[in-house]
Image (cartoon, grey):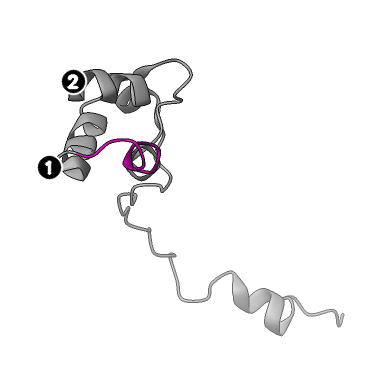
């Protein structure tokens, strides 16, 4: 009976393939069995459609890449700060 109830409340096209908490809230007022929450959790975690179509809500951390150091210290910045190196006199 439990697999049929789970299929009706999770897999049926009108059920929406909701998550663990939402499926439990739909079931708890009408059904009870021992370890109900664990059964719901295992059923939803093994659902192939949910695994295929659910997207990650957070991005996985990216890999670090080394940054090449500049050729000289403040090489490009000094020109703008102090002015040009050429003299305007004569």
Q: Which residues are magenta?
A: 25-32
Q: Quadrant of residue 47?
A: top left
Residue drawn at x 86%, y 83% is 89
Seen from the viewer's position, the closer of residues 77 and 23 is: 23
Q: Is residue 48 above or below residue 36?
A: above
Give the Cα separation between the discs numbered 2 and 1.
Answer: 13 Å
Which quadrant does the N terminus fall into? top left
Residue 58: % across, % down: 41, 48
Residue drawn at x 46%, y 25% is 16
Q: Which of the marked residues, 2 or 1, is nearer the chain's N terminus?
A: 2
Q: Quadrant of residue 69?
A: bottom left
Q: Is residue 37 above or below residue 72?
A: above
Residue 80: % across, % down: 70, 75
Could you tell me if residue 85 is visible in this image?
Answer: no
Residue drawn at x 13%, y 44% is 35
The kind of secondary structure element at disc 2 is: loop
The kind of secondary structure element at disc 1 is: loop
Residue 79: % across, % down: 67, 75
Which quadrant does the C terminus fall into? bottom right
Q: Which residue matches tag 1?
A: 34
Q: Which residue matches tag 2?
A: 1
Seen from the viewer's position, the closer of residues 77 and 52 is: 52
Q: Residues within 10 Å of mark 2 (few under 14, many from 20)?
A: few
Residue 85 relative to residue 21: left or right: right
Could you tell me if residue 57 is visible in this image?
Answer: yes
Residue furthest left in the image: 34
Seen from the viewer's position, the closer of residues 63 and 24 is: 24
Residue drawn at x 27%, y 25% is 6
Residue 72: % across, % down: 45, 71
């Amino acid at each position: 009976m439990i697999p049929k109830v789970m299929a009706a409340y999770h897999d049926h096209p009108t059920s929406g393939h909701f998550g663990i908490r939402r499926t439990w809230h739909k079931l708890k007022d009408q059904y009870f069995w021992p370890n109900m929450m664990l059964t719901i959790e295992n059923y939803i975690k093994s659902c192939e459609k949910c695994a295929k179509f659910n997207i990650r809500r957070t991005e996985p951390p990216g890999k670090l890449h080394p940054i090449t150091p500049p050729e000289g210290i403040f090489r490009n910045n000094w020109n703008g700060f102090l002015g040009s190196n050429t003299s305007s006199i004569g």
